[in-house]
Image (tube, grey):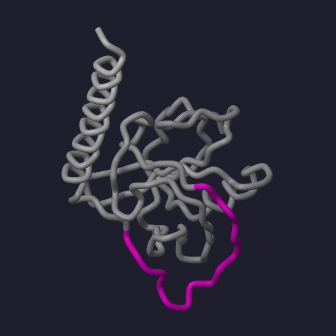
Amino acid sequence: MTRELAIGIMIAVAVLILLAMLFAWRRRLRRDSGLTAPLGVPEHAEVARRDEVLYVSTTRHDQPLERLAVSPLAYRARGELAVTDRGIALCLDGAPTVFLAASRLVGVDRATVTIDRVVEPGGLIRIAWSADDDTVIDSYLRLAGGDPKNLISELQRLVPASDEAAPDTGATR
């Protein structure tokens, strides 16, 4: 086998792998096209706190390794989380503002693992929210600086009380 043939085979394999990745991502975008995050902050929402965050991912509820491509939360980004009296505003770089009204929130806690990211125990903030009447999903954030303990406490106050006990997710609180 000549050197040129070996290089040609390696390039062809690399191109095939990249094409497979592209087609898989496009299929995931089509699969999840029915799920969208609510956009726009309601008028007169009073901001109680702002924090710089790294948006990590959105996954199926209690399945931290099953990524969802929810528009506009399909890609990782830096941004700002604003806690308001009516819910959570997530302003990510290059994307419209996502607003999770308090009525959509299902739970807020700490997590350690999500797709493509493993951090120190409890280093991620997991926000469980309703995308529609039947679908609960989890979005993961990482606070840019400091311990997320106080932020999580404020976010948990927004979650409406539920009649059933919270499920055990394996996340550290």
- Judged left or right of residue 115, residue 3 is left
- Judged left or right of residue 60, residue 95 is right
Quadrant of the rendering where the N terminus is positioned: top left
Residue at 31% from the left image edge and 64% from the top image edge: 36
- Residue 46 pos. (x, y %): 63, 84
- Residue 98 pos. (x, y %): 45, 70
- Residue 10 pos. (x, y %): 33, 23
| Nearer to the camera, 92 or 58 | 92
Q: Which residues are magenta?
A: 38-54
Quadrant of the rendering where the C terminus is positioned: top right
| Nearer to the camera, 169 or 95 | 95
Q: How many numbered badges does the structure rendering display? A: 0
Residue 44 in magenta? Answer: yes
Q: Which residue is outermost to the top? A: 1
Is any part of residue 90 visible from this angle? Answer: no
Is any part of residue 32 visible from this angle? Answer: yes
| Nearer to the camera, 135 or 72 | 72
- Residue 72 pos. (x, y %): 38, 64
Q: In the displayed structure, would residue 96 be above or below residue 147?
A: below
Residue 110 in magenta? Answer: no
| Nearer to the camera, 94 or 19 | 19
**Quadrant of res 18:** top left
Residue at 62% from the left image edge and 44% from the top image edge: 124
Q: In the displayed structure, would residue 55 be above or below residue 20?
A: below
